[in-house]
Amino acid sequence: SQQGEEDPQALSIQEGENATMNCSYKTSINNLQWYRQNSGRGLVHLILIRSNEREKHSGRLRVTLDTSKKSSSLLITASRAADTASYFCATVSGYSTLTFGKGTMLLVSP
Amino acid sequence: DADVTQTPRNRITKTGKRIMLECSQTKGHDRMYWYRQDPGLGLRLIYYSFDVKDINKGEISDGYSVSRQAQAKFSLSLESAIPNQTALYFCATEGWSTGTEQFFGPGTRLTVL
């Protein structure tokens, strides 16, 4: 069963704007990861945040984690057309493997 | 060259046929995974292997089998394909510990008629 649920399912913005995607999950986690998938291609790892971390940055990406609310957000600043993709959160609990959400489809228009 | 490769990239087959999807990796990772992706859904785990002698069922293993021929090779078989196995299949590897970054192959698009 899927642990993470992304919101919104789809997001359409203009180049230069910020994009925010959210992920909610049900059980306690060891870490939460975000992946990007360009249309029909393999997933690419973006960032991993551990349960004892609250915020993490990587280039134009900012991820926050609120374990009390069982939620995470991914912020992409100054979006570019090349950021158009689906974004998935994935959680790790205990000794289990990754469990993926259904993803958010981001469209960035020039 | 890509670190994780999958063959074939596209395959159309008929109901009842046996089909094998292959995955090879040059990352030297022990952990390998097979997922399927259906439109509008996330990835669901089919099988995974932590080393050559270790095979584990995932969430949706029914109708599938796997073989870990070597550290670098992990194959997925559909013994008797059915139309609802039409999906995008991904192989992934993982490094030193479960729950760390996974590296994905480009995917195999399988259509079962």
Image (tube, coloured by chain):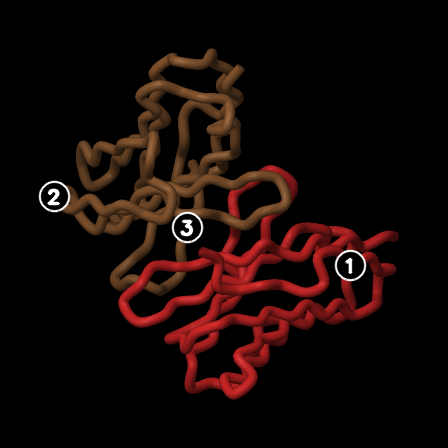
Query: Is residue B55 shown left or right of residue A108?
Result: left
Residue B61 position, x and y percent, is 33, 39
Nearest to the observer: residue B3 or residue B99: B99
Task: Report the residue that reaches farthest toward the left.
Answer: B53
Q: Which residue shows up at 12% across the image and 43% down it?
A: B53
Question: Which chain does the numbered disc 1 sit on?
Answer: A
* Separation of residues labelled 3 and 1 (CA atoms): 26 Å
Residue B15 sits above or below residue A67 on the image: above
Mark 2 lies on residue? B53
Instruction: Pick whichever of labels 3 and 2 is earlier in the sequence.
Output: 2
Marks 3 & 1 on one chain: no
Three-letter code for the amino acid on which mark 3 is drawn? Phe
Question: Which chain does the numbered disc 3 sit on?
Answer: B
Nearest to the observer: residue A93 or residue B94: A93
> Residue B105 occupies which quadrant of the picture?
top left
Q: Which residue shows up at 54% across the image and 50% down it?
A: B42
The answer to whether the residue labelled 1 contacts the one labelled 2, judged by CB atoms less than 8 Å apart, is: no
Visual hue assigned to chain B? brown
Residue B84 sits above or below residue B13 on the image: below
* Separation of residues labelled 3 and 2 (CA atoms): 21 Å
Mark 3 lies on residue? B103
Q: Is residue B55 visible?
A: yes
Mark 1 lies on residue? A11
Mark 1, secondary structure of its residue = strand
